[in-house]
Image (cartoon, grey):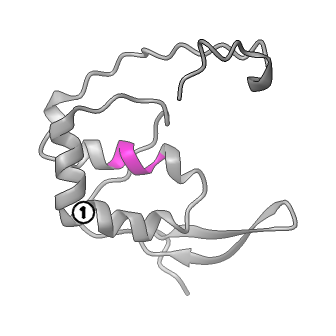
Amino acid sequence: IPHPEMWHHFVECDGSLHRIMRLALIRGINLFMGSQWFIIPRYFVDWLLNDSLPKQLSNYAKHIVVADEHYFNTLVKNSPFCHNLVNTNYLFAVFDRWENEIDSSIRLS
């Protein structure tokens, strides 16, 4: 019987999510969830590319639902830079037109 502190493991099939097993939590870190919209500074990117935790969490995140809302939030809160977190919503999104309707002169490349 799996330990109750284990997370669920899901797979997508035929447009539905199915739990196929329980996935053990990574020891020594706390999991966090938040927005997948964020801004990160260069020093954090350097840490992401050179530390072992992002690679370890990446292997874990392959098997969880809404990994984009867990992965970076968990890394920020478990990084040496967790005290630098600014929790302010800078999101500006306009979803009033389809991408092909937007003037090509203002489209980001």
Give the labeled residue for mark 1.
53
In terms of depth relative to the viewer, which is nearer, 23 or 39?
39
Is 72 magenta? The answer is yes
Segment colored magenta? 70-74
Does the segment drawn in magenta span residue 22?
no
**Front residue of this view, candidates 101 and 91:** 101
The residue positioned 28% from the left and 70% from the top of the image is 27
Can you say which quadrant of the picture contains the N terminus? Answer: bottom right
Count of numbered circles on the image = 1
> As drawn, is 107 to the left or to the right of 76?
right
Q: Position of residue 107 (x, y in %)?
A: 60, 19
Question: How far across and how far down the image is residue 35, in percent?
Answer: 49, 33
Q: Is residue 57 left or right of residue 79?
A: right
**SS of the residue under disc 1:** helix
Residue at the spot 30% in from the left edge and 49% down from the top edge: 75
- The picture places residue 93, in percent across and down from the top left corner, at 60, 16
Q: Quadrant of residue 10?
A: bottom right
Whether 20 is drawn above or below 95: the answer is: below
Q: Amino acid at mark 1?
A: Leu
Residue found at x 51% / y 47%? 68
